Image (cartoon, grey):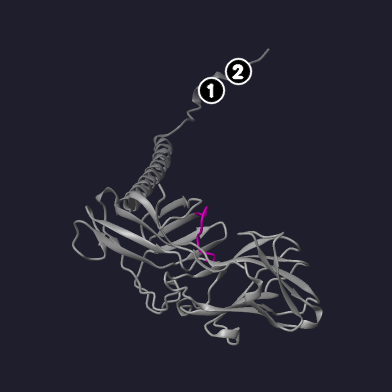
Amino acid sequence: MLHMNWGVLRRDQRGITGLETAIILIAFVVVASVFAYTVLSAGIFSAEKGKEAVHAGLEQARGSMELVGSVKATSIAATSIDTFESAGSWIPSANVTIASDTSDYKESATSLDVTIAAGFATGLAAYRNSTAVNLTSPQHYSLQVWVKSSGGAAAADYAIVLDDTAGCGSPIETIDLPALTALTWKQVVLDLATPTADSAIACWGLQATVDDGGEVITLDLLEAPKEVTAISFVVANALNGEAINLTTSTDTDSDGLLSDEATKNHVLTVIYADEDQRTTDVVWTRTELGKGDGDALLEPGEKMQITVSTIAANPMPVADTTFRISLVREQGADMILERTLPAALATEMDLN
């Protein structure tokens, strides 16, 4: 039988004292305080970050531009140089023959076959003298020509030359043709190196830079094509926000780029892009419309016409080109415009 010593149990006074209770209570208070401080700090930090994000978003929005009205494109008319209808007007070099081709052509009813024999080597294969053709009124920046090679050619194997004197002895333009696939027509666009100097082209020709050992180069319709030289649109200050700096820089070398200028005053960078290229920091100008105070700041209630030059594009935009213009600001949201040019270019076009 279990016998318990009740006297011992009655004398045992062990338990929690007031001091131990206080220590436990203080520990709970400290832990709770730290936890509360951590939660409050995290909440305050999150609130501040949220406020910063809201203010940044408002600043971006209030410092943004918006499009007013439509986007317009300006183009120049084509200038025909040679339709290659008359083989007799061309002068071949030794080991080169010229013939009209009425069975394989791209424009009109005739193309020109330039047959370069194996003994020719390199140099000016054939040329044509003509009355002066002015490529500066209107100002053109490129050439366009249909070309075909009998055996194919690498890039720069052949070139189109332009000269302001008869005989093409000292060309002012030597423009390399791209790579050609054998027996395949290709319409190529070639940038003019010195467009402002091409005011009296009196001779043009075909130059061979390599000896292909016998080749037939077929040409059709050499022209300075219709080109879109400028894109314009009107912008306003969105949400009546902060003034937007539209100070411009001067294109001193007239190449259509601001990135190579020694003095750059602009903070707005314009980027032109299409399926063939992305050209950064192209030339743009501003024109204040209607009510304004005459300065370079786009302020609430004011409107500015932005005109973007496309002459730095290579190739320049032609019919059916889909392009994108991005206006990138130092502060504030970027503005992006994307449009497609029509199949038939007019002098002035509304792209909306």
Considering only order in the chain, which callout, 2 or 1, is on the residue closer to the N terminus?
2
Q: Are marks 1 and 2 in contact (CB under 8 Å)?
A: yes
Q: In this view, does 14 lie to the left or right of 64?
A: right
> Which residue is the extreme one toward the bottom?
169
Question: Going 35% across and 69% down the picture, which residue do you hit?
Answer: 266
**Pick the front one: 1 or 109:** 109
Q: In this view, does 88 lie to the left or right of 295?
A: right
**Pick the front one: 349 or 47:** 349
Q: Is the magenta stretch mostly helix, strand or loop?
A: loop
> SS class of the residue under badge 1?
helix
> SS class of the residue under badge 2?
loop
The amino acid type, in three-letter code, at marker 2 is Met
Would you say residue 192 sits in the magenta stretch? Answer: no
Mark 1 residue crowding within 10 angstroms, few (<14) / some (14–19) / many (20+): few
The amino acid type, in three-letter code, at marker 1 is Leu
Would you say residue 320 sits in the magenta stretch? Answer: yes
Q: Can residue 105 be seen by looking at this rendering?
A: yes
Question: Which mark, residue 9?
Answer: 1
Image x and y of residue 35, in percent: 42, 42
Q: Can residue 63 be seen by looking at this rendering?
A: no
Could you say which quadrant of the image residue 103 lies in?
A: bottom right
Q: Name the residue under label 2.
A: 4
Mark-to-mark CA distance, 1 and 2: 9 Å
Q: What stretch is highlighted in magenta?
A: 314-322
Mark count: 2
Question: Going 59% across and 66% down the picture, which residue do you hit?
Answer: 83
